[in-house]
Image: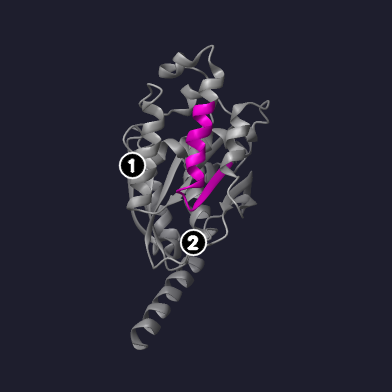
Amino acid sequence: MYFVSFEDLQFIPEPKTVFIVATLNLVFDESGKAADKTHVVYAGFIIDQGEHWSELGRRWRILLFEKGITTFKASEAFSFNGPWRRFRGKSDERDALLRDLAGLSLLFPREATGTIINADAFKALPKAERDRYKGDAFYCAFEQGILNGIQHSGISPEDNFNLICDDSEEYAPECLRVYRRFTKEHPDIAERLGTICFGDDEKVVPLQMADMLAYCLRRQAENAPDGIWKEILDIFLRSEGVTAERRPVVVKRPSARMIFRLRLGLLIRSAKGLFSR
């Protein structure tokens, strides 16, 4: 068992509505690379499918289009680069747009989740553990992000998840391999996973919101000077009744016995359900 990060976060509003069993979208994006950053973050949101999903996309795009922007990328928006150069010398206008975008997180997602990996702590892991992640803290954040996002969620245990991740030619193939290993090692979590897919953040708007959250969490982890990122992060936590649960991230490879017990438990539960009908 190894501690590799100072925190995993879950922002869970108090439940106000009862939903029938559903399949929800768990949308993730990353911020930071271990090669040039002190922390790697994998963060995102749990969002209902259907109207919530499409309305979030519609409102997000309208806010951007009104300012002549087509896509949000945190690395550009917070540094006035790319299309966001138009806001140089007009930071107040840029900041107002960022606040409006972040404000949509109070209307549509059910929860926010984030996993922060300290790059130096990851490098200090035994070689065998680092090799499981190809020596890249990102894959550790990816795996732990899925585990903690579902395991510590306030969502009903009967509900299931589809994972939607940002598509990356560099990371997607290995992420799929890590995901397949993850489902074998965590059959209890795998039972709640419907699918995994990799989407273009220019077309899948919730990925852009996840990018915004991941960026702000990384800046906080780096103890960056206060700026608009801090205000945006505060907006993500502003929802009435929200609680922020902070836990150390633990990299623990499940033993064969543990996996067997989990699978046996699932079989027993399925059998009880079958005979109780």
Q: Measured from the top left, where is residue 256 in percent x and y?
A: 48, 64
Displayed quadrant of residue 183:
bottom left
Q: Quadrant of the C terminus?
A: bottom left
Query: Which amino acid is tagged 1?
Result: Phe
Say if the magenta span includes residue 10.
Answer: no
Q: Of circles 2 and 1, which is in front? A: 2
Identify the residue shown where x is 53% and y is 55%.
253
Q: Secondary structure at mark 2?
A: loop
Q: Quick check: 257 left or right of 183?
A: right
Image mark for residue 198: 1
Residue 135 visible in rendering: no
Query: Which amino acid is tagged 2?
Result: Ile
Q: Which residue is mark 2?
A: 155
Cα–Cα span, label 2 and label 1 = 23 Å
Identify the residue shown where x is 59% and y is 48%.
9
In the current view of this chain or complex, which residue is farthest to the front?
66
